[in-house]
Image: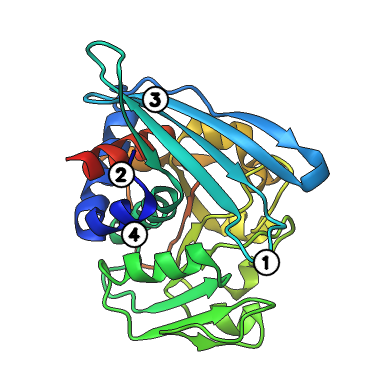
Amino acid sequence: MIGEAAVRAKLTYAALIPAMEQALADFSAGLVVQPVRSVVPVKEHAGFLGVMPARTRDGLGAKLVTFYPRNQGLHTHHAVIQLFKPETGEPLATLDGRLITEMRTAAVSAAATKALSRPDAAVLALLGSGVQARSHLEAIRTVRPLRDVRVWSPRVKRFDGARICSTAEECVRGADIIVTATSSNTPVLRGEWLSPGAHINAIGACRPDWRELDDEVMRRSRLFVDSREGALSESGDIILSKAAVVAELGGVFAGKEGRTSRDEITLFKSLGMAVEDVAAALLVIR
C-alpha cells in the first residue's frame, strides 16, 4: 500500500514527462490494450465513478477514480490505482491515485506543450485556479522558460507565481500557452481572444455534454487528442462542435505529426487514459 505522501516523495516531472511521452507513443502504436473508460454517474451529487484498466508493454493495472465537482473543502478528484503482475495476475501494489492523476495530467500537457507550442513561447494563461492549474504551472515551467504567468478564475484571490486577471479575456489576450482547467460545463475560452501561434491545453469538460471551448476555438485550432476513440465518445468540446481530430498525441511524439507553421493555433484536448496511470504508478514502484 503506497499512500500519497510516498508517491509525492518519489514522483518528479523530470522523470514523469518522458514516461508519459513513451506511454502515449506506445498507445498510438498499438502496443497497449485499453478500453474506453466506464463511467458510473452519481447524479444526486453531480459526480461520477470512472473505471480505467490497461495492459501496457510492462504493466497491468486499473484506476478507480471519482470526480465530484461540487466538493467544498476537499479535492474534487479521488482515486486508487491497482497494479498486478502481468506474468501471474497477482496483486502487486495499491497506490493512492489522486496525486498521480494530478501530476500525470500536467505532465502530458507539458509534453504536448514541448512538442506543439512555439519554442519561444513564454506567456502562460491559466483559466482555473485549482489543483490542475497549479500543477500545470509547475509542469510547463520545466519545458518552457516562462516570463509572464496570468490566472483567471471567478473565485481566485491568491495564486503564487501568477498575476491575477479580472476577466478571462484579459488573461488570454497575447498568451502563447493557454490552459483551461475549470469545472465549467459551458465555454470559458473564446476563439476571438486567441493570438496567432498560440497553443492550448484543454483539461476540463470531460463529459459529452460539457464544454470549455467555444466553436470558434475549435474552428481555428489544429486538434490533437490523447485517444481518438476516447475523445469522440467523451469530449463535449469535440462532439458538439464536430471538430476534426488531426492526430493522437502519441503520433506527435513518434514524429508523425506536429506544428506546421509558426502562426497556426494548436489544441491538445486532454481526457486522460489508464495507460498514463499505469505508467506513472510503475515509475513510483521503480
Please rate how many residues cluster around mark 2, counting C-alpha atoms within 10 Å: few if below 14, some from 14 to 19, many from 20.
many
Upstream in the sequence, badge 4 or badge 1?
Answer: 4
Secondary element type, mark 1: loop
The residues bearing labels 2 and 1 have C-alpha atoms spaced at a distance of 27 Å
- Label number found at residue 252: 2
Residue at the spot of label 3: 54
Q: Is residue 109 above or below residue 155?
A: above
The residues bearing labels 2 and 3 have C-alpha atoms spaced at a distance of 21 Å
The residue positioned 43% from the left and 62% from the top of the image is 264
Upstream in the sequence, badge 1 or badge 3?
Answer: 3
* Amino acid carrying mark 2 in the image: Val
The residues bearing labels 1 and 3 have C-alpha atoms spaced at a distance of 33 Å
The residue positioned 25% from the left and 10% from the top of the image is 88
The x, y position of residue 279, in whole percent, is: 29, 37
The residues bearing labels 4 and 1 have C-alpha atoms spaced at a distance of 21 Å
The residues bearing labels 2 and 4 have C-alpha atoms spaced at a distance of 13 Å
Residue at the spot of label 4: 110
